[in-house]
Image (cartoon, helix red, strand yellow):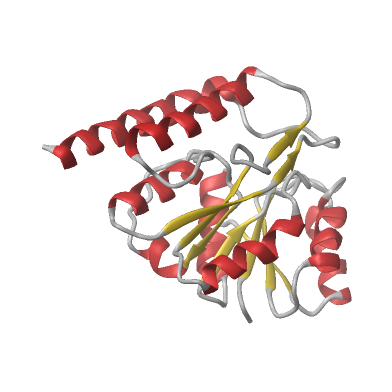
Amino acid sequence: MKFSVIIPAHNEEGIIFKTVESLENVVIPGYEIVVVNDHSTDKTAEIVDILAKKYGNIRLVENTNEPGFTNALQSGFKNAKTDIFLPVMADLCDDPDTINKMYEKMLEGFDIVCGSRYMRGGRKIGVLSFKSFCSRFVGRSLHLLIGIPTYDISNSFKMYKKNVIESIIIESSGFDISAEIPLKAYFKGFKITEVPTTWVDRKEGKSKFKVFKQGPRYLKLYLWALMNKILVKI
């Protein structure tokens, strides 16, 4: 298998079938899908079992730790059978058409390939919000101030080599893991690039991201990155 698509899923019975089908329709053959059931109380697991019988490359695993995006994602990392990981949101916001381009970049020798909504060719479809403004500002300013080669540090849609994940002590407890990994990898010297992607705001279910809860965690990482850049220059 070429790479592992990891889908953390908490109560996604209304959309998980469409998400998996969209992947199976466009992604190059030879990959696996690992759906991590993150303490769902609906029929998410039952639907994934049906999909696993239909397609031979799908597995359902359980997040046996505390519920939450970081723990679910790490459960996926541990259960993946390949050396390349790609988190994909269960709500169909990530564009499957981008995945083949991301894998091509990995074959060129990059360690992380970021799906970027804010580089030329990338875009977001949905209601503009304070969350959108913050993610765009953080991504562009970090690119300018520390030189990290992506405009979209906060997007979870990133492809990683396994050795990147193994080299980092993950301290995040929520969605901020999506910024923590590439920032720490950047300062360790891993090769990072980005490709444009289209992000679509979810139309079904409720977003698990709470800006006022997650915001301070991103701010802490932002300040950490700026301080590390200053120390590197000294």
Q: Quadrant of the C terminus?
A: top left
How many numbered marks are there?
0
Instruction: Point out the residue furthest to the left here.
Output: 234
- Residue 93: x, y in percent? 75, 43
Please identify the quarter of the rendering in which residue 102 is found: bottom right
Q: Could you tell whether 121 is left or right of 92 in the image? A: left
Please identify the quarter of the rendering in which residue 98 is found: bottom right
Please identify the quarter of the rendering in which residue 81 is found: bottom right
- Residue 77: x, y in percent? 52, 64
Q: Observer-nearest residue: 40 or 23?
A: 23
Q: Is residue 174 above or below residue 104?
A: above
Q: Observer-nearest residue: 51 or 201?
A: 201
Q: Could you tell whether 190 is left or right of 76 in the image? A: left
Residue drawn at the location 71% of the way across and 33% of the way down: 207
Q: Observer-nearest residue: 96 or 205?
A: 96
Q: Is residue 67 above or below residue 81?
A: above
Residue drawn at the location 39% of the way across and 44% of the way down: 148
Residue drawn at the location 70% of the way across and 37% of the way down: 123
- Residue 51: x, y in percent? 85, 68
* Residue 25 in view, yes or no: yes
* Residue 67 in view, yes or no: no
- Residue 103: x, y in percent? 61, 68
Q: Quadrant of the N terminus?
A: bottom right
Q: Is residue 50 above or below residue 149?
A: below
Residue drawn at the location 84% of the way across and 52% of the way down: 43
Instruction: Point out the residue furthest to the front here.
Output: 120
